[in-house]
Amino acid sequence: MRIQEGITKRSLEILKANTHGLILDIGMGCGFASIYLKLNGFRSVGIDLNRLFLNYYDLADVNPTQADMRYIGMRPESVDYILSISAVQWLLAEEEPLKREKELTLFAEFCASVLKPQGKLLIQFYPKSDVMMDELGHIFNLTGHFKGNFIIDNAYSPKKRRIFLYLEKK
Ligand SMILES: C[S@@+](CC[C@H](N)C(=O)[O-])C[C@H]1O[C@@H](n2cnc3c(N)ncnc32)[C@H](O)[C@@H]1O
């Protein structure tokens, strides 16, 4: 929980998020980031594939919804920020390359659609390799809707290394 809170804090710092904007927490799990957001005055809604995680704590206050980040529909241009912590590596784990590419593309297109213009996205994830890391960046780049790059904290410490994909919608 402390680690997830630390990552959330750092993510908000990178996003320079203000408390007026709405944050979509993708892959919210049992809500460590969403609860931190709520306690610090941010507005958020969260989704997760797994209902069991969503029911682990009483999360009603942080607007949890069961949904799959690959196949979700939400009103276009309805959120100011997307935050996803330690979840997107699940999409990268798909072993069949064409299927992986298709699912990552669906996810990237969804992010492009749901973010308001100039909205910001931050994905913290654990790729298995640099190739996987680049694959995610490449897919988002192909949408043509984003500018930004990777931010790597503690690059040379295997334990403390944190990889963030930080993008702004054009
Ligand atoms: C390691 S947990 C991270 C949870 C939370 N973000 C945190 O920092 O505590 C990863 C979460 O991603 C969710 N997840 C995996 N694939 C997903 C998908 N396709 N759509 C939505 N959530 C997904 C899992 O159910 C799990 O709750």
Image: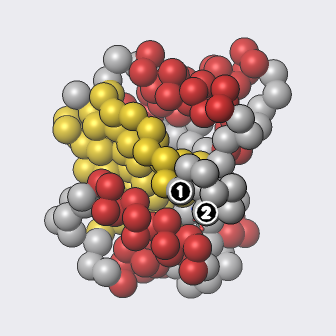
For label 2, the crowd category at 10 Å Cα-Cα, with few meaning under 14, some 14 to 19 and many 20 or more, is few
| Contact check, label 1 and label 2, Cβ < 8 Å | yes
Q: Amino acid at mark 2?
A: Lys
Nearer to us in this view, 107 or 88: 88
Residue 106 shows in the view: no
Q: How far apart are labels 1 and 2 at the CA level?
A: 6 Å
Looking at the rendered structure, the secondary structure element under dot 1 is loop
Query: Is residue 91 rendered to the left or right of residue 24?
Result: right
Residue 94 percent location from the top left of the image: 77, 32
Reply above or below: 8 against 69. Answer: below
Q: Please say whether residue 89 is visible from this viewpoint.
A: yes
Residue at the right extreme, as displayed = 95
Q: Residue at x 30, y 54 (%)?
A: 15
* Sequence order check, earlier mark of 1 and 2: 1
Image point (32%, 24%), residue name: 145
Percent of width and height locating residue 82: 38, 50
Name the quarter where the N terminus is drawn.
bottom right
Residue bearing mark 2: 160
Q: For the residue labelled by badge 2, is the local secondary structure a helix, a strand or a loop?
A: loop
Which quarter of the rendered picture does the C terminus lie within? top left
Name the residue tied to disc 1.
154
Q: Quadrant of residue 130?
A: top right
Image location (x, y in percent) of residue 77: 26, 39
